[in-house]
């Protein structure tokens, strides 16, 4: 009986966390919708491409953070679930000490990257662009150090399931950052001011989250000595995570680096506009799964077995699919007009780049809880190794397809590698090695797809076959509203199961809609 209030509280925090995470994701999409074209008009195509290229380079440095971040969250949650609060506190303290050493590594790496960037892009960029690129690398290098040290606070907030504050603080900086960027960019028409604002906003968020962790949650990283078992556990677990993290960087960022080398900053800008869309799409799949690490940890520790975990996997996957398929379908139909109106006709090719990647990417997004299950089960190494091999394959095929198909070829290369990894190999592993019921999972998803696919087909035929004006915001918004109504109606009548119907009905009653 004593655990029931805590369990109910955790369930409430998770539900609130999912809701506020979707609010944050929606706000992120709206901010990008307004922010990107304004930024393009302020700094121009070349400067925007330069900014995206530097972000691609520095992302490899940020991936160093993956060496510990996932391990900290996992073992802090595990020790708290076991009631061993002393070791949980020591996990945070040891991690803080390791991050000081990694900060020195980051400074050296930034200096080296600045030199290498000057050599690699000296022929395709102007001398001024090369110099600006090097300064931006140093600024974002300092930003990555702040991110590393803040990981301890985020792990504590996540373990205590205070998702509302975590996402709320991120939402505040999300809204403030573009305002400051545009204010500075209107005076200084370059990408450097963007990186400076990002640094300041990240610092503000880190201070807020550290204060909340220490003052409100009373979390103190108390050093109990250099526990080698904790260090081995952190690095043993995180070695697999960093493989996958580096592989992710190769998947998402190397395309832009190669395009910058083969073509120029303008080509990087076009590809980056497409990447803005699929990276925003990525957030939809991360929302639901991001709040379930403590829950999955408890289920696994309590020996609930794969049946309960499989049921949870299917339930979360269905929710993620409802959201992801709505966005995917809407973009596939309305995307050509959206890209032209949003970024300009010179970015029309960005639609193909985004669409080609989003289709296979959907499989990974709706199964994102599987990554959490792998972490808790300590089976993450397979995913890391597999993704690393596929990432190298992606680099080779990108170079080949760039010569044959242009920048769209880079997107096709990434899409093929993702389908092989997410669609085929990982589903086999979930079923054969973890024992998850993937037949149950896909049967549940198929029950949603069958009534929703006809809605998408009819909507596409109507939008592109009827004699209506295109590339106008009025028609675009009206068509989007009709699609939302048709999609929601089909979902309510044919898609929802009893659990989901009760969940949505309860939410509507809380906000005063319905009986």
Image (cartoon, helix red, strand yellow):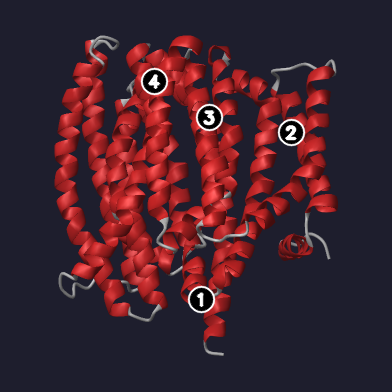
Q: Residue furthest bottom?
A: 1
| Secondary structure under the numbered disc 2 in the rendered image | helix
Pointers 4 and 2 in contact (C-beta within 8 Å)? no
Q: Is residue 303 left or right of residue 440?
A: left
Comes first in the chain, label 1 or label 3: 1
Q: CA distance from mark 4 to mark 1?
A: 50 Å
Q: Label 1: few (<14), some or many (≥20) within 10 Å?
A: few
| Residue 224 placement: quadrant | bottom left
Pointers 1 and 3 in contact (C-beta within 8 Å)? no
Q: Is residue 353 left or right of residue 272?
A: right
Q: CA distance from mark 1 to mark 3?
A: 37 Å
| Secondary structure under the numbered disc 1 in the rendered image | loop
Q: Is residue 338 left or right of residue 160?
A: right
Marks 4, 1: nearer the viewer = 1
Which residue is painted at 34% across and 40% down in the image?
A: 246
Pointers 3 and 4 in contact (C-beta within 8 Å)? no
Percent coordinates x, y for residue 202 in the rendering: 33, 46
Q: Label 3: few (<14), some or many (≥20) within 10 Å?
A: some
Comes first in the chain, label 2 or label 3: 3
Marks 1, 2: nearer the viewer = 1
For label 4, the residue is 49
Using the image, tell me which numbered label, if any, was put on residue 303: 1
For label 3, the residue is 416
Percent coordinates x, y for residue 277 in the rendering: 54, 31
């Amino acid at each position: 009986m004593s655990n029931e209030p805590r369990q109910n509280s955790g369930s409430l925090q998770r539900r609130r966390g999912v809701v506020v995470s979707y609010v944050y994701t929606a706000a992120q999409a709206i901010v990008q919708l307004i922010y990107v074209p304004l930024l393009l008009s302020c700094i121009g195509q070349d400067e925007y491409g330069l900014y995206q290229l530097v972000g691609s380079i520095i992302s490899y440095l940020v991936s160093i953070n993956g060496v510990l971040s996932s391990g900290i969250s996992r073992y802090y949650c595990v020790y708290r679930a076991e009631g061993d609060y002393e070791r949980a506190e020591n996990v945070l303290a040891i991690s803080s000490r390791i991050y000081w050493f990694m900060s020195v590594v980051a400074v050296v790496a930034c200096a080296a990257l600045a030199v290498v960037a000057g050599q690699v892009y000296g022929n395709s960029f102007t001398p001024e662009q090369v110099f600006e690129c090097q300064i931006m690398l140093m600024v974002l290098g300092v930003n990555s150090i702040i991110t590393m040290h803040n990981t301890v606070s985020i792990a504590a907030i996540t373990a205590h399931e205070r998702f509302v504050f975590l996402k709320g603080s991120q939402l505040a900086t999300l809204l403030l950052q573009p305002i400051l960027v545009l204010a500075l960019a209107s005076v200084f028409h370059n990408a450097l001011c963007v990186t400076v604002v990002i640094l300041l906003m990240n610092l503000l968020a880190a201070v807020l989250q550290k204060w909340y962790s220490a003052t409100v949650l009373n979390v103190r990283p108390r050093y109990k000595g250099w526990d080698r078992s904790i260090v081995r556990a952190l690095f043993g677990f995180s070695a697999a995570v960093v493989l996958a993290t580096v592989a992710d960087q190769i998947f998402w960022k190397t395309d832009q680096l190669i395009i910058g080398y083969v073509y120029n900053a303008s080509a990087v800008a076009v590809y980056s506009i497409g990447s803005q869309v699929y990276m925003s799409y990525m957030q939809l799949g991360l929302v639901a799964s991001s709040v379930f690490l403590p829950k999955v940890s408890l289920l696994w520790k309590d020996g609930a077995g794969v049946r309960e975990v499989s049921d949870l996997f299917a339930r979360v996957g269905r929710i993620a699919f409802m959201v992801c398929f709505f966005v995917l379908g809407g973009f596939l139909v309305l995307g050509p007009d959206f890209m032209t109106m949003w970024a300009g006709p010179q970015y029309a090719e960005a639609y193909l780049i985004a669409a080609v990647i989003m289709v296979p990417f959907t499989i990974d997004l709706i199964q994102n809880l599987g990554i959490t299950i792998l972490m808790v089960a300590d089976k993450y190494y397979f995913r890391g190794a597999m993704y690393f091999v596929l990432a190298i394959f992606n680099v080779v095929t990108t170079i080949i397809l760039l010569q044959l198909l242009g920048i769209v070829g880079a997107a096709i290369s990434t899409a093929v590698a993702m389908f092989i990894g997410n669609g085929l190999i990982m589903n086999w592993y979930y079923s054969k090695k973890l024992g998850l019921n993937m037949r149950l999972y896909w049967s549940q998803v198929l029950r949603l797809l069958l009534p929703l696919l006809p809605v998408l087909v009819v909507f596409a035929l109507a939008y592109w076959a009827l004699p209506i004006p295109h590339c106008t915001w009025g028609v675009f918004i009206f068509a989007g509203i009709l699609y939302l109504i048709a999609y929601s109606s089909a979902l309510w009548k044919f898609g929802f199961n009893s659990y989901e119907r009760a969940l949505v009905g309860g939410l509507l009653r809380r906000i005063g809609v319905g009986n």
